[in-house]
Image (cartoon, rainbow, N blue to C red):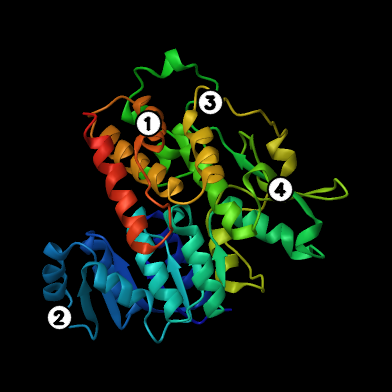
Amino acid sequence: MKQNLSVLGSTGSIGTQTLDVARRLGISVCALAANRNIELLERQIREFKPRMAAVFDREVAQRLRISVKDMDVEILEGMEGLCEAASFEEADLICNSVVGMVGLQPTLSAIQAGKDIALSNKETLVAGGALVMKEASSKGVSIFPVDSEHSAVFQCLQGSPSEKALSRIILTASGGPFFGKSKGELEHVTVRDALNHPNWDMGAKITVDSASMMNKGLEVIEASWLFHQPQEKIDVVIHRESIIHSMIEYTDNSVIAQMGVPDMRIPIQYAITYPERMPSPVKRLSLKDVGKLTFYEPDWETFPCLSAAKEALARGGLSTAVINGANEAAVELFLKEKTPFLRIGEWVWEAMEKIPLGDNAVTLQAILEADREARAFVRSRI
């Protein structure tokens, strides 16, 4: 079990639950990082007493310095501060739960420092999977998945005799708030409708991604990098109850599933304590109370983000960085009520088809440039 954590994105949904796990297990927290919620960050600093805290928004960092001047903590700012928190010498596990492309560079900083990573930042592997996994391999760094689906696959694979024995990964999806609706029914849905997730309590961006099925598309890309599988060996099934978090199929056609109530503290804790298992405050699963488990084929036509992600993975190179950047920009516009919901999927596909990728080489600079171009492309559609 890890003894000293650096938690990036500490004021978000995953970050606060990570700190809850640390609190319950008596694990020290040596560094924290957040975007701009310095009121909550100050409370976290006073409770966990980290040596370092980073605020990504430079304008509010000075306010935090004044607020905690009585504490023995160094306050850093910007991307530089985030990367320092990700590579802090005292940390033996970096929990990266920031949202968006901002998480890529801290992940690379952690790898360069030889730090193991508990990863819930999807964009790290979606946009930069080839680069990140290459660097992690060269540095001997372990990446422990925190997403419930990838944690489920990781847990199921613990009994695998070899990578060759794996035939298929089956990612489950709740279907979000718009399951079963037609395109016509989605034309006038509101931000409030999209944020009404049936099973999970998540941040706004991730919840909208769940509504558009982009979240599952991004997870297909992540799974490909984490478990070294091509996209044709990664399936998606709608499972409304969110009890089975994902499954694997072996070459003998046996299927193993990981189950539990929908509570992110299970995968967070497993990433921190691996390979040990510790008591958890999460409610025990009662299949008798659940009653039934249902499964459906995704509606690929109504939710084109899912197929866009699989297509980008098949194309390779910078295509996944493009669709990720386009999606982030489109979701931002939707949350600001500047574009209808259905435009998200349309613009993701358009960006992938129309943005030139040059030689398609996956370097950090090329990833960041593809991301910028995709965002600019989407914003130009308004």
Q: Amino acid at mark 2?
A: Lys
- The reply to whether callout 1 and callout 3 are in contact (CB within 8 Å) is no
Q: Given this view, does label 4 or label 1 mark the residue nearer the observer?
A: 1
- Indicate which disc residue 36 carries: none
Q: Which residue carries the number 2 mark? A: 69
Labels 4 and 2: the sequence-earlier one: 2
Q: Which residue carries the number 3 mark? A: 179
Q: Given this view, does label 2 or label 3 mark the residue nearer the observer?
A: 3
Distance of label 3 from label 4 (alpha carbons): 21 Å
- Indicate which disc residue 350 carries: 1
Asked where in the image residue 159 lies, by quadrant, the reply is bottom right
Q: Amino acid at mark 3?
A: Phe
Distance of label 2 from label 3 (alpha carbons): 50 Å
SS at circle 4: strand
Q: Is residue 97 left or right of residue 49?
A: right
Distance of label 2 from label 1 (alpha carbons): 49 Å
